[in-house]
């Protein structure tokens, strides 16, 4: 354990940290990507571009960050200290694309085929049968509790907002629960909501009402670039007019936009290019996020390069969901998949597009696994997307990039004046971070070790674990 000798291993987790309101963390190894105010002058850097620094923590905030051994330049030498001995210190991470309202439904409504059509149909059935306020609240709270315990500090969740017709006003129910949960978790996890519906809904009265509901709920307008009941594929004939309608609704209400785009292996799916053109047409640069963008990886090189250049020009943020896209894409019974299902992330970043990694679905029909653990997600992303050799840039995709996308000044960063939220890892190099699950990480919130633990699955059904 951190800063402890062998005889201290039986001490309570986090007990090596001083209990004083102000203390120093010595010899912390921090990836430079998280130090968004810059690496302190003179701080040693290792081969992973990690700085060895001393961090002052006072009254729940980060104070000055100094090169290792120089903390007394900013604080009295008598101030209590804990020595990390060169182990990794990360900020709490950011999951900017997930689905808390779908989560943890796989046991009651499985996807028997494991593919996208099966996921769509199973989710529709589960929504119709079960998604009342109590069910939504229980599963969303469970997902947040998992994320919080693992060290996630900010989440953007997409919320199914289809027209419930005569059955129930699903959008109103879901957004009502979201607002309650967001308020209840304020100060623990920063939570944003995005309206999720097929894009053709915005040409209807429901789309206008939904836009109003999103605006009054402080959310983002969003959707999927496929028709109601359909699949991602070749662009809709009316995609431009539907996007114009969406952008008009967004501008009238001053809403940012977050879309599910081209979640398919069909290279004829070109909605990303249409979204980029609409962003430029409506002068909405810097206010649009596109998730998935899978088909871009299978398009001819010149076509893909032109789209990527337009995405960069439009200032579109791209979110890649590597675990879920690798799970769903190119799936056919009895056949091994031939590609990884993910967007061409390296080409996007090389063109100047800001790319984030996120967790997406968790234990539902779209992805049967997961635990809302962004550290696990970035570890998987490194392997799937080849974000290594060097590893130095990978941490940014789960920290400052999605934090900036969400408009949160300090999320995913370690900077003076920000909340002293950290994940302390029993690893020295980034290779060691990626190589193990780091189940014995220590999460700190506002300078204190987190007492919360990962909830038991029994909590989903009103029971509790026997320990």
Image (cartoon, rainbow, N blue to C red):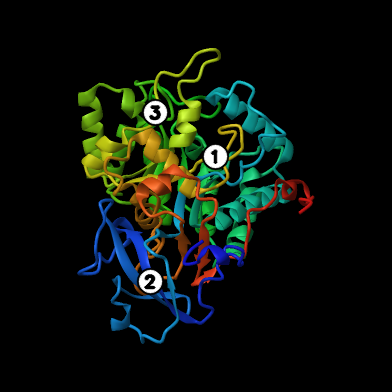
Residue 172 in view in this figure = no
Picture residue at 39% right of the left edge, 31% below the top = 342
Labels 1 & 2 near each other (Cβ < 8 A): no
Q: Which percent across, then down, holds residue 221?
A: 46, 48
* Residue matched to label 3: 238
Of the residues tagged 1 and 2, which is closer to the observer?
Answer: 2
Q: Quadrant of residue 125?
A: top right
* Residue matched to label 2: 26
Where 210 falls versus 267 (above or below)?
A: below
Label 2 Cα crowd, 10 Å radius (few <14 / some 14-19 / many 20+): many
Of residues 265 and 67, the one nearer the viewer is 67
How far separated are the C-alphas under marks 3 and 2? 59 Å
Of residues 247 and 103, the one nearer the viewer is 103
Q: Which percent across, then down, holds residue 428?
A: 38, 55
Q: Which percent across, then down, holds residue 314?
A: 26, 44
Of residues 308 and 392, the one nearer the viewer is 392
Q: Earlier in the sequence, mark 1 or mark 2?
A: 2
Residue 34's label in the rendered image is none
Picture residue at 51% right of the left edge, 56% below the top = 441
Farthest residue to the front: give it.
7
Q: Secondary structure at mark 1?
A: loop
Q: Secondary structure at mark 3?
A: loop
Q: Secondary structure at mark 2?
A: strand
Q: Earlier in the sequence, mark 3 or mark 1?
A: 3
The quadrant the C terminus occupies is bottom right
* Residue matched to label 1: 361
How far separated are the C-alphas under marks 1 and 2? 37 Å
Of the residues tagged 3 and 2, which is closer to the observer?
Answer: 2
Of residues 421 and 5, the one nearer the viewer is 5
């Amino acid at each position: 354990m951190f800063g402890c000798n062998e005889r201290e291993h039986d001490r309570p987790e986090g007990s090596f940290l001083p209990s004083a309101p102000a203390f120093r963390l010595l010899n912390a190894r921090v990836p430079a990507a998280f130090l968004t105010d810059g690496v302190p002058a003179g701080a040693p850097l290792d081969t992973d571009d990690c700085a060895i620094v001393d961090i002052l923590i006072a009254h729940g905030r980060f104070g000055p960050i100094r090169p290792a051994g120089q903390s007394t330049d900013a604080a009295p030498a008598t101030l209590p200290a804990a020595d990390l001995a060169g182990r990794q210190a990360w900020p709490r991470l950011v999951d900017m694309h997930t689905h808390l309202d779908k989560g943890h439904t796989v046991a009651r409504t499985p996807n028997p085929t494991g593919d996208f059509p099966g996921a769509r149909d199973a989710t529709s059935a589960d929504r119709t049968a079960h998604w009342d306020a109590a069910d939504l609240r229980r599963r969303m709270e469970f997902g947040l509790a998992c994320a919080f315990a693992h060290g996630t500090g900010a989440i953007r969740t997409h919320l199914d907002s289809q027209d419930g017709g005569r059955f129930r006003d699903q959008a109103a129910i879901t957004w009502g629960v979201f607002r309650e949960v967001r308020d209840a978790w304020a100060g623990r996890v920063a939570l944003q909501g995005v309206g999720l519906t097929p894009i053709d809904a915005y040409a209807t009265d429901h789309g206008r009402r939904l836009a109003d509901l999103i605006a009054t709920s402080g959310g983002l307008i969003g959707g999927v670039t496929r028709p109601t009941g359909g699949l991602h594929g070749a662009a809709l004939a009316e995609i431009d007019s539907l996007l114009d309608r969406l952008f008009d609704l967004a501008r009238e209400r001053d809403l940012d936009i977050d879309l599910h785009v081209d979640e398919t292996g069909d290279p004829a799916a070109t909605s990303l290019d249409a979204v980029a053109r609409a962003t430029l047409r409506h002068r909405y640069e810097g206010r649009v996020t596109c998730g998935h963008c899978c088909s871009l990886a299978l398009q001819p090189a010149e076509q893909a390069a032109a789209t990527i250049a337009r995405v960069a020009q439009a200032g579109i943020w791209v979110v890649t969901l590597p675990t879920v896209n690798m799970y769903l894409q190119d799936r056919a019974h009895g056949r091994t998949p031939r590609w990884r299902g993910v967007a061409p992330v390296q080409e996007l970043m090389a063109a100047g597009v800001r790319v984030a990694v996120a967790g997406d679905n968790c234990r539902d029909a779209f992805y049967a696994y997961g635990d809302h653990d962004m550290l696990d997600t970035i570890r998987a992303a490194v392997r799937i997307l080849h974000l290594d050799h060097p590893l130095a840039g990978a941490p940014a995709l789960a920290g400052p990039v999605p934090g900036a996308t969400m408009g949160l000044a300090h999320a995913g960063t370690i900077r003076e004046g920000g909340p002293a939220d950290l994940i302390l890892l029993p690893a020295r190099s980034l290779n060691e971070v990626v190589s193990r699950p780091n189940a014995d990480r220590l999460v700190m919130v506002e300078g204190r070790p987190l007492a919360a633990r990962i909830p038991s699955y029994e909590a989903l059904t009103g029971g509790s674990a026997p320990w």
